[in-house]
Image (cartoon, coloured by chain):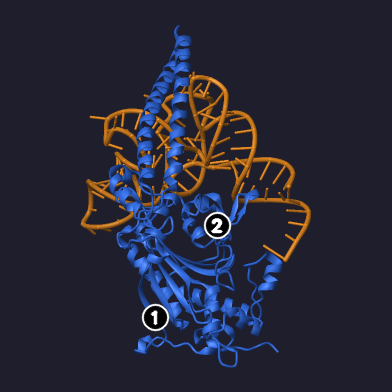
Chain colours: A blue, B orange
RNA sequence: GGAGGGAUGACAGAGCGGCCGAAUGUUCCGGUCUUGAAAACCGGCGUGGGUCUUCCCACCGUGGGUUCAAAUCCCACUCCCUCCGCCA
């Protein structure tokens, strides 16, 4: 949720910033107008309320002293109370409308966020490949690495999409044997690398509507999520959801900031608008495992938190020896809650595509305001900032590893950093 | 799932429907005293909103209701505790 006070103070600036990401200026003006109206009604209702309270006190006194005009006073109070009730209802109505519209407004983009309408305007800021640190040219992938992961996986018996579809429908992958073990190794590997600074959390895989609101996933993206209406629950689309609500409603000690958490969870996405697009193999699935990094930080120190998450995500990709590029998302492609987002895309030679495997975002106080997470400053309080990023999303990493590691004989070489998590194993061979 | 008990400020813990935003204690922060500390004493100490005011309003788990007036009465829900049942 954006800051209503700021919007009130500089409506033109906020409107212009939101216009960069495609928000119609009229919807901003509407919120401003509702705010004015709401405050007018609030004053009206509150002054009536004050009079009711005052009169009620007098009724009490009159009754106690057995004054003759007590009945008279009480019926006056009753009339006033009715008026107050009506005034409050009018005020609440406008207030609810205001809140609903405010909730619909996306975050104000950072000035650093490049201009642009959609994903085609995202800016590539750098690229990395194994050997780059030794001044080697970009990797030339061999012909045997040009086999899509679903074929490689079928050869080796490590991915079973048909059975996944039988159990849960299409786009719910099922990994088996060394494929499943590889996934487990990736999660353990990442969590261990973050252990020095991030507390590991294993949150519930479902969240209440209120929890989904905090991150901004609701009310806007309801169609993209799995819902369990009977229990007012949603399957989490990312660990960002529970992590952002971890300290919901709390006032934090500023000396503790940044508070950093990491969590490995399954992530569920309906991918409603994406039917038929990029759906082969693991390119786009309804459920995947991901390790998330998250920080509550002081508004003046968000960049350190942001850079740390980004460095860690990149560090994992480098350790896994995968080619990747870094994209600065343009204003038009930003997620609702984000002020600035950097995506990491891994190059997967078998499908010859760049696959998004991480998204690192700074949310300013947009989520903290919704989740009501503050810290003490002087004798007042301020909202913290939130930062998060994937490190990393494993389904697509799995695909890239299987394609990149493929050898002429069809077996797949596993990066050295994972071997410790696979009992020293370095190669996935076809099962006998 | 069944039966009972509970939810009040950082914590503990009071609160006949009418000066209750809330006693009291502890913690914490100032001050006095002290060479210093402790103790003692004095003072302060929730959050948010409003034309941000020695003013007003809201908030005593959440949402409704009764009333001139609700922390206090009524209803529903949530969470916690105890017991029973079931269970990885």
Residue A251 visible: no
Left or right of B76, for residue A298: left
**Picture coordinates of residue A298, whole percent (x, y):** 34, 59
Depth check, front residue: B67 or A136: A136
Query: Please, is residue A65 above or below residue A205 in the view?
Result: above
Q: From the image, which quarter does the C terminus of chain A lie in?
A: bottom right
**Of callouts 2 and 1, which one flags the residue occurring earlier in the amino acid sequence?**
1
- How many residues crowd mark 2 within 10 Å: few (<14), some (14–19), many (20+)? some
Foreground of the two, A424 or A396: A396
Query: Which subunit holds the residue at mark 1?
Result: A
Q: Is residue B44 left or right of residue A209?
A: left
Image mark for residue A170: none
Check the image and report above or below for A22 versus A278.
above
Find residue A124 and report its image quarter. bottom left
Characterize the local packing of mark 1: few (<14), some (14-19) or many (20 or more) Cα atoms within 10 angstroms: some
Residue beneath the point at 46% across and 11% down: A70
Q: Position of residue A353 (x, y in %)?
A: 48, 76
Q: Is residue A44 visible?
A: yes
Frontmost residue, A85 versus A404: A404
> Residue A8 at x, y = what percent?
31, 42
Q: Secondary structure at mark 2?
A: helix
Q: Position of residue A72 (x, y in %)?
A: 46, 9
Q: Give left or right: position of A304 versus A96.
A: left
Q: Are marks 2 and 1 on the same chain?
A: yes
Label 1: element kind: strand
Q: Which mark is residue A224?
A: 2
A152 w.r.t. A221: above or below:
below
Instruction: Residue at 52% x, 89% y: name it.
Output: A143
User: Mark 1 sits on what residue?
Assistant: A128
Which chain's residue wears label 2? A
């Amino acid at each position: 949720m954006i800051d209503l006070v700021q919007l009130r103070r500089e409506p033109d600036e906020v409107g212009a910033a939101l216009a960069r990401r495609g928000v119609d200026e009229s919807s901003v003006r509407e919120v401003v107008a509702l705010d004015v109206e709401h405050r007018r009604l609030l004053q009206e209702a509150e002054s009536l309320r004050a009079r009711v309270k005052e009169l009620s006190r007098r009724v009490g006194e009159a009754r106690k002293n057995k004054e003759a005009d007590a009945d008279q006073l009480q019926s006056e109070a009753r009339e006033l109370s009715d008026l107050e009730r009506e005034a409050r209802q009018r005020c609440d109505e406008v207030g609810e409308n205001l809140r609903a519209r405010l909730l619909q407004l996306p975050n104000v983009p950072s000035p650093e966020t490049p201009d642009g309408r959609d994903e085609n305007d995202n800016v590539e800021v750098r690229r990395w490949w194994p050997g780059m640190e030794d001044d080697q040219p970009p990797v030339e992938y061999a012909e045997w690495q040009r086999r899509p992961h679903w074929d490689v996986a079928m050869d080796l018996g490590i991915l079973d999409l048909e059975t996944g579809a039988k159990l849960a429908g299409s786009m719910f992958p099922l990994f088996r044997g060394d494929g499943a073990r590889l996934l487990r190794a990736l999660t353990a590997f990442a969590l261990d690398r973050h252990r020095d600074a991030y507390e590991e959390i294993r949150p519930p895989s479902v969240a209440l509507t209120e929890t989904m609101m905090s991150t901004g996933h609701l009310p806007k993206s309801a169609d993209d999520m799995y819902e369990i209406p009977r229990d007012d629950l949603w399957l989490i689309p990312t660990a960002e959801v529970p992590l952002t609500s971890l300290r919901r409603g709390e006032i934090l000690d500023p000396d503790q900031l940044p508070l950093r958490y990491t969590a490995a969870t399954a992530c569920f996405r309906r991918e409603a608008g994406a039917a038929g697009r990029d759906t082969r193999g693991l390119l786009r699935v309804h459920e995947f495992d991901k390790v998330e990094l998250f920080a509550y930080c002081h508004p003046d120190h968000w960049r350190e938190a942001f850079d740390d998450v980004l460095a860690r995500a990149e560090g994992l990709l480098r350790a896994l020896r995968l080619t990747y590029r870094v994209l600065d998302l343009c204003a038009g492609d930003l997620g609702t809650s984000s002020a600035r987002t950097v995506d990491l895309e891994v190059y997967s030679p078998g499908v010859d595509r760049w696959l998004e495997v991480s998204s690192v975002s700074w949310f300013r106080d947009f989520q903290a305001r919704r989740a009501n997470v503050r810290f003490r400053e002087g004798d007042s309080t301020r909202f913290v900032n939130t930062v998060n990023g994937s490190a990393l999303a494993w389904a697509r990493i799995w695909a890239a590893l299987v394609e990149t590691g493929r050898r002429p004989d069809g077996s797949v070489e596993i990066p050295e950093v994972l071997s410790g998590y696979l009992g020293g194993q370095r190669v996935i061979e076809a099962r006998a």
